[in-house]
Amino acid sequence: MNRVVIVGASAGGLATAETLRRTGYRGLITLVGDEPELPYDRPPLSKQLLAGQWEADRLALRTAAAIDDLGLELRLGVPATALDTAHRVVTLADGSRIPYDALVVATGIRPRRLPGCPDGVQVLRTLPDALALREKLRPGRRLVIVGAGFVGAEVAATARGLGVEVTMLESAPVPLALAVGEETGRFLARLHHDHGVEIRTGAAVSEITGTGVRLADGAVVPADDVLLAIGSVPNTEWLSDSGLTVHDGLVCDEYCAAAPGVYGVGDVARWHNPLFGTDLRIEHRTNAAEQGMAVARAILGEPRPFAPVPYFWSDQYDVKIQAYGHLRDHDEALVLDRDLAARQLLVAYRTGDRLTGVLAVGKSPKLLRAWRALIAARTPWAAAVTTAA
C-alpha cells in the first residue's frame, strides 16, 4: 500500500486521512477537493456564520499547521472528473492523472436546484454560499425559503434572529413528516410559527421570478431573496464510466467498500448498515467522521462492519433537536412527551417489531444516551416502550 487517494476534502475525507496516520500508515496520501479551502466544518454555515457570530476562519476543522503535520499531498480547488478502476487512476479537471492503491470517495452532495432558476437564487452548501446569503440578510428584507427541511428551518431561525421576514414554502402537507413523522413535523412548524415565520404547506412552486415565487395555483409570494432548500444530489457524476454501482449515492457493502480498493465515506456513500438491515445514505457530520475512521481501518487490513447508531442534531432558535437511529421509513412514531410551552418533545420510532430511533427536543443528553443504548441493543418495541414508561 503505497498511495491512498481521498477524493473529498471535508469532514469524512479528513477523518480518513487522520486515522490512517494515527494508525501508522506512512505512505503517500493525496487529498483532492473541489473547493480551494482547507477542510472546514459545514454545520455552522446555517447558524453561527450566517448569523455573523463567527467569521470564516473559525470553521477550519484543523489549523494549517495540523494539516501540514499529516504530510498530505493536497490537490485543492481541482475536482475529480473520472475514475478508471481497471488501472486504478483518478483524473482531475486539470487533466492530471493520479494512480492509487486504495481510493476513498468522499465527494459529498450538492443542493438540488429547480430548472430555469434566475441568477440570484441562493442555495446553501459551501462557505461562499453562506457568505453570499449573509450579505443579503438585513432587517426588514423578505426571505422566501423553498423547502422546510432541516437546512431551510435552520436558515429560517437564523434569519428571524436578524430581523428578516421569512416565509417557508413546503410542498408536503406537514413539514418533515416523511423524515420524522407528522407529530414531530407539526411541533417544529409550531416552533417557527411562534417566532414569526409564515409556513405555507401544500405549496408547489411553478416559477421563481425577479420579485418572488409563483405557486402552482397562480399566487405570488413576494421576496427580496429566495433560498432553495429542496434536498440534495450526491456528487457521483465523475463515477459514471467507472463501473461502480451508483444509486442515490455510491453503493457500498457493510464494510463501506464499493469495489476492491474503493471505499465510500460521508454524504455520498450508500452503505449497508447491518444494525438496521438496510442501506443508508446519511447527510450528517458525525456519520461522515465515524465512517472515515472505519474506512481507514479497512484500508489497513482491519475491516469491521460499519454499524453505527446514526446521530444528528439541529439548533433552531433556543432549542436543540437531537436524534439517534434510523427514523426515515418508520412504521410508527410514538410521542412519549410533548410540552409546547416548555418546548420539549420526545418521540420513539418503530420499524417492524423493533425500536429503531428516538428524537428529542429540549431533553437531557443522559436520557438520549439511554435510548441510544436501547437502539444499539436491537431492543424489541414492546420492551423499549415498557422501559420508557
Image (cartoon, rainbow, N blue to C red):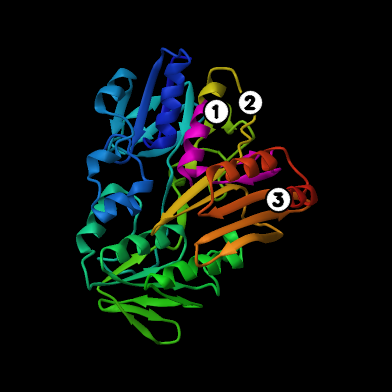
* Mark whose residue sits in front, 2 or 3: 3
Magenta stretch encompasses residue 269: yes
Answer with the quarter of the image where residue 57 lies: top left
Secondary structure found at label 3: helix
The residue pinned by badge 3 equals 388
Tell me which amino acid carries mark 2.
Answer: Arg
Mark 2 and mark 3 lie on one chain; the one further toward the N terminus is 2
Up the image or down, 139 lies above or below 110; here it is below
- To which residue does mark 2 refer? 304
Question: Which region shows up in magenta?
Answer: 267-295
Q: Out of 138 and 263, give the one closest to the viewer.
A: 138
Give the image location of residue 118, x and y in percent.
28, 69
Which amino acid, mark 1?
Ala
Q: Residue at x 25, y 27 (%)?
A: 64
Rate crowding at label 3 as few (under 14), some (14 to 19) or many (20 or more) other CA atoms within 10 Å: few
Closer to the camera in the image, 297 or 258: 297
User: Which of the 4 quarters of the picture holds residue 172?
Assistant: bottom right
Q: Give above or below for 351 relative to 264.
A: below
**Residue contact at pointers 2 and 1, CB within 8 angstroms:** yes
Drawn side of residue 326 relative to residue 97, left or right: right
Tell me how far mark 2 sits from mark 1, CA to CA. 7 Å
Q: Work out how far the residue at label 3 is from the one at label 1, CA to CA, in angstroms.
A: 32 Å
What's the residue type where badge 3 is placed? Ala
Q: Is residue 354 left or right of residue 206?
A: right
Decide if residue 14 is on the left or right side of residue 102.
left
> Comparing marks 3 and 1, which lies closer to the viewer?
3
Residue at image coords 43%, 44%: 108
Marker disc for residue 294:
1
Residue in view at x 63 percent, y 35 percent? 307
Residue 36's quadrant in the figure? top left
